[in-house]
Amino acid sequence: MLESYIKKRLAKKDILLMTHIVIGYPSLEDSLAMVKAMVEEGVDLMELQIPFSEPIADGPVILHANQESLARGTSVKKCLDFAEEVTSSFDIPFLFMTYYNILFKYGVDRFAEQMRTKNIKGAIVPDLPPEEGKDYIDAMKQNDLAPIYIFSPTTPKERMDYLASFGRGFIYCVARKGVTGLDTSFSDQLGTYLAQCREATSLPLALGFGVKDKDDVDFLKGKADIAVIGTQTIRLMEKDGIGAVRDFIANLNEGL
Amino acid sequence: MIDRGYYNGFGGAYLPEILVATFDELVEVYQQAKNDPNFWKEYTDLMSTYSCRPTPLTFAGNLTDHFKGARIYIKREDLNHTGAHKANNVMGQGLLVKRMKKTRVIAETGAGQHGVATATMAAKFGFECTIYMGEVDVERQRPNVFWMERLGAKVVPVTEGSRILKDAINEAFRDWVSNMDTTHYVLGTACGPHPFPEMVSWFQSIIGKEARKQILEREGKLPSRVYACVGGGSNAMGIFSGFLDDPVELVGVEAGGKGLASGQHASRLCSSDGSIGVAQGYKTYFLQNDDGQMKETHSIAAGLDYVGVSPILSNFKETGKARFEAATDKEVVEAMSLTMHKEGVIPALESAHGFVTAFKEAPEMKKDEIIIINQSGRGDKDIFTIADAFNDPEWRDFIIKKAEEYNA
Ligand SMILES: Cc1ncc(COP(=O)(O)O)c(C=O)c1O
């Protein structure tokens, strides 16, 4: 259903926007205000990151947001309640993004059930390759949820096929090596990589890591189906507040 | 990747996709080396010419007399180049880096021992070298930072998280996901994603191989028990490896910090505070809360101050293959003091944890029984920490005077 939502939406827009927040950073109220601003300015889907103490795939900005959120008392329970609140208030698909230990400690089956009852559509778990994720894949299937798998520029063709065979909803293509929040060069090379990703799967492609302005999003039109904006909105919020995030999203969404 | 390094459900390789290809390459090079008899020879040659292998097995006669129980032997990993068993792992991985034709190495370090060892290896083999070290550890281990920098390494203080060993590991992974084409991550202990637990244990198994041979030569029989401190678990795996098929009891000693009841410790296996989880790429016992968030740990010994532990040792705990105990900071200082007075050897604070439990148990054992304690490193490099632990007033005056000189 996530996939069909994306495809329907793509009939009206050249490229969709997916944004990201860390739940509870800087506070649960601010997180809610961020979601509201993003949805109202036309974001098509959102990642809600449940903070984890050891987020190895994240760069300094998101790492810091994880730590601050935890220091302010964000628990998994509060994140689940938050998810329920946003899915009942806003009419776009929401995904969880987190690390495997959060699911593992909660109980993978129980966690997937919670996702379904809270109306979360899928999850991105960057440290859980399919080889380690049989329980997760089964639980997601059972609850009709989309496990989002990740392609990277170091992923060989056969492995892309392998990953795509487990993926639902869309594939998250990481734009480059490194962690979140560093610069990405939007170049021919990225275009070639996305073409390879496209060949490996019929699922929609999201492109993330380093998308930071309108030019980047324009570059991705026709090459990817979803542009993912992660670190940039956290930086903006930290610097200029949620109003600035609203303006930024409005600008990105113009003419899509 | 076919073999994912599971030990009864512990271990695995919980990797971000970007690193999968890098690990595939590492597994392959490691397997080739393991199957190549020339490699082990190259490795032992290197360790006997660049480090002090085989390290001696010292009979601790005075301690034996003192406790009036089992005959106490000490395996002298402190006599390695750079003063700890860390050299065994680092030089082994250095040889693999050469085979992979990479030009840069990175490492995490807690006590600084692994960082210094990696820096020497990088200097010898001509690699660029960056060491990640928690800011807290940079503060408490300044002499090791000094040596790493003199040896040509760049030391990056890690200011996120609890700013100790686990945070340094996270930062090293963050570097690696950007630079894996040129860079190998020399993980310092038998933790992390496969193949690290197995590979590091393999390099460290040189300790146990030697110890077994040495005790049979000296005593004509096997020890009843072998003791080692357990941080990530590499020195313990190293010495245990020599006795896995023997009727020898393996005893791992974790950091009891201010006491298990205080919650301020790093005892993942022997306390009831540890539970199974997945972080830093592998599944093992972690000190974590009910949500799966890692807790702060505490130990007087920076090298034991870590939330996770080797998945191989978690398996040993489950199967009863090894027994795990804790030693408190206070007991550690006492055992260290006694060892220095009686034998004139200076165990590292980490190693002294093994001595604590051995000293508790030796008196109850028969006089013809033998125990071996692994002295994983030497304590004189920890002079600042140890002087503080002993609360040495003259040392303090000396430092104050020294500071005045600098201020003058
Ligand atoms: C001397 C010494 N012993 C023990 C350790 C603990 O590590 P492991 O458990 O991997 O042997 C360290 C770590 O820095 C160390 O420096």
Image (spheres, coloured by chain):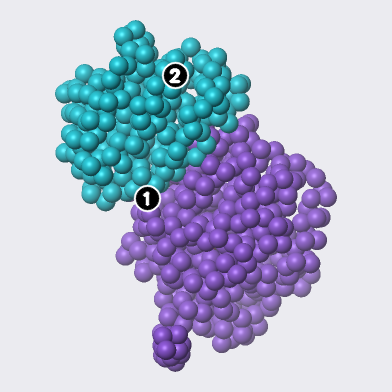
Chain colours: A cyan, B purple
Towards the viewer: B194 or B20: B20
Q: Is residue B22 above or below residue A112?
A: below
Q: Is residue A114 above or below residue B272?
A: above
Q: Is residue B389 left or right of residue A122?
A: right
In the rendered image, which quarter is residue B396 located in?
A: bottom left
Label drawn at residue A108: none
Secondary structure under badge 2?
Answer: loop
Q: Residue B317, how many percent across, how many down?
A: 51, 51
Q: Residue B330, how many percent across, how many down?
A: 41, 76
Towards the viewer: A12 or B287: A12
Residue A179 shows in this picture: yes
Q: Residue B270, how many percent across, how many down?
A: 44, 58
Query: Is the residue at mark 1 in contact range of ligand 1, meaning its CB lies under 8 Å from it?
Result: no
Secondary structure under badge 1?
Answer: loop
Label drawn at residue A224: 2
Quarter of the image containing the N terminus of chain A?
top left
Q: Is residue B215 above or below residue A32?
A: below
Towards the viewer: A21 or B238: A21
Quarter of the image containing the C terminus of chain A?
top left
Residue B324 shows in this picture: no
Q: What chain does badge 1 belong to?
A: B
Label drawn at residue B294: 1
**Dot 2 crowding, Cα within 10 Å, few <14, some 14–19, many 20+:** many
Seen at 77% across and 43% down, the residue is B35
**Dot 1 crowding, Cα within 10 Å, few <14, some 14–19, many 20+:** many
Q: What chain does badge 2 belong to?
A: A
